[in-house]
Amino acid sequence: MILLLIMVSPPCKTKPDFKILKAESRSFAGGTVWSTSGITYHIELEALKTIKSIEFKAVWIGKRKFEKLTTNVDNEDFQTGRINKGQKLRISFTHSVNNNPNISDEEFEEFNDGKYADCPVEYSGKGMIFYIVKEKEKYIEIEKIERLEPLLRP
């Protein structure tokens, strides 16, 4: 009888931890010879529940994996820790292109981010956010990314 109930009962669905409020990208160019160009990404999330301990590990955009993330909660730097229900979180990262022949690609790659890497879970949107809660890997799919006007520095 118990086995029958388990087989018939609907699967449990966990409530998501976050809602994506917006995801944006902006191309930039330095405006001088050999300056860096690239794309900056900003993703804003809202916590749908209190999480005692969380760590954001990476974001995939297409086939690129970004691990050098800047995270802010309520405009304060945040690396790991507690997030309360309703708090806003902002994740930022940049993919740059080396335009300077005086800097080797190896030197540039030391501080650049956005290397090609497959995401461990499939997704159909524009990207995926990877984070850890209670030693459990979790993902949030980014459905769309709004492209803002390019920033061209003089």
Image: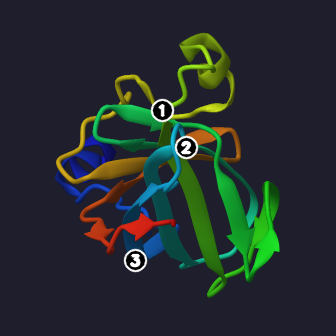
- Amino acid of disc 2: Ser
Is disc 1 in contact with disc 2, using a CB cutoff of under 8 Å?
yes
Q: Are marks 1 and 3 in contact (CB under 8 Å)?
A: no
Q: Position of residue 112 (x, y in %)?
A: 59, 32
Q: Nearer the viewer, residue 99 or 134?
A: 99
Q: Which residue is mark 2?
A: 35
- The numbered disc on residue 56 is none
Residue at the spot x=59%, y=62% of the render? Answer: 91
Q: Which one is earlier in the sequence, the residue at label 1 or at label 2?
A: 2
**How would you rate the neighbour count of disc 1 (Cα within 10 Å): few for under 14, some for 14-19, many for 20 or more?**
some
Q: Residue 4 in the image: x percent, y percent?
A: 21, 46
Q: How many marks?
A: 3
Q: Earlier in the sequence, mark 3 or mark 2?
A: 3
Disc 3, disc 2: CB below 8 Å? no
Using residue 112 as the reference point, say whether residue 128 is left or right of it.
left
Q: CA distance from mark 3 to mark 2?
A: 29 Å
Residue type highlighted by circle 3: Lys
Residue type, mark 1 in image: Asn
**Residue located at (45% from left, 54% from top):** 29
